Image: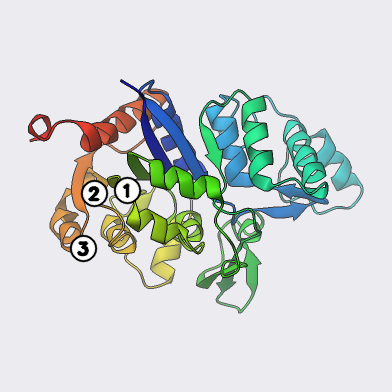
Amino acid sequence: MSPRKVCLLAGGVGGAKMAEGLAAHDDVALSVIGNVADDESFHGLWVSPDIDTLTYSLAGRIDRSQGWGVADEGHRALETLNLLGAETWMSLGDRDFGLHIHRTMRRAKGDRPSDIARDVARAFGVTSDILLPTDDVVQTRLRTTDGRWLSFQEYFVRERCAPEIRDIAFSGLDMARPTPEALAAIASAELIVVAPSNPLVSIAPILGIPGINEALRAAAAPKIAVSPFIDGKVVKGPADRMMAALGLRADALGVARRYRGLADRLVIDHADAGLKAGIAAEGPAPHCSDILMKSQADKARLAREILDLAFAPAEAMA
């Protein structure tokens, strides 16, 4: 039997882990639509953190101790920049700089960002398709309680998620156009998975690109989302604090509300079994599992469970 076409929407470390889990199975032909709204220019170079995390993870080159960056990394370039008085709060390693230099050079030549991402992934030995939702620049902006607007990297890295937020905006979103590769992956998918990524700043900017949400809702494939929450807390990142600050439920039920009308099923942790009735009332059918992905085996196990939910005969899942 031919591999099943699976399209994953992903951002951040949770998205990369889910991508690794799905890519571990030979019966999956994986396409990953990654978040580009975290992209920003540093030291004159265009940095694409979520796309790079996907690339490094699927290539087996990720620094697993922190979940991003390259393993066996040095920081001599950053030390020189610091000596010269540059702001170096965005920690970029020497090997990482090489990728950013390459990406920036090609963008300056007019190459499509989607082509650059594809070629980089192939050069790193990634066999899954890493797709951009748009080739246009879309950037997350967060307004804090003191009235400042911060980029996502300023908030996440420089400020260490300390400021409380009052609003989220995505500059360039209204004018962005979806890539044909992303639309084709959605239309041809036999399963669409929403990774356990931050719903507000990882998944929302993908869904918000004109044409993407419509394509997802029109797709015939089953759509399964995975909650990033376990007992009201996230494993990594600021999603719980961000949702609470904006007056949203910061738990699996809050995720179900975000994905109402999009996800057919929501995979939640056993710790959130008490929310099943409320989740079902929002639309997605809840499914309890162990969603914590600590090891490669955990990632593959959860991915297989999701695949079985979508493809196993109904009688086998009863």
Q: Residue at x 60, y 78 (%)?
A: 146
Name the residue carrying label 2: 265
Residue 154 picture quarter: bottom right
Q: Mark 3 to mark 1: distance in Å? A: 13 Å
Point out the tag, 3 or 1, that comes first from the N-terminus. Answer: 1
Farthest residue, direction bottom: 147
Name the residue carrying label 1: 225
Q: Secondary structure at mark 3?
A: helix
Near mark 3 (Cα within 10 A), the count class, few <14, some 14-19 or many ≥20, is some
Residues at circles 2 and 1 in contact by the CB criterion of under 8 Å: yes
Residue 126 picture quarter: top right
User: Tag on residue 238?
Assistant: none
Q: Position of residue 292 (x, y in %)?
A: 34, 37
Residue 251 versus residue 99 in the image, above or below:
below
**Does residue 114 show up?**
yes
Q: Residue at x 26, y 46 (%)?
A: 268
Q: Position of residue 8 (x, y in %)?
A: 42, 42
Q: Position of residue 162 (x, y in %)?
A: 56, 62
How is colour applied across the structure in the image?
A: rainbow
Position of the C terminus, as image quadrant, is top left
Name the residue carrying label 3: 282
Q: Mark 2 is on which residue type?
A: Arg
Q: Secondary structure at mark 2?
A: strand
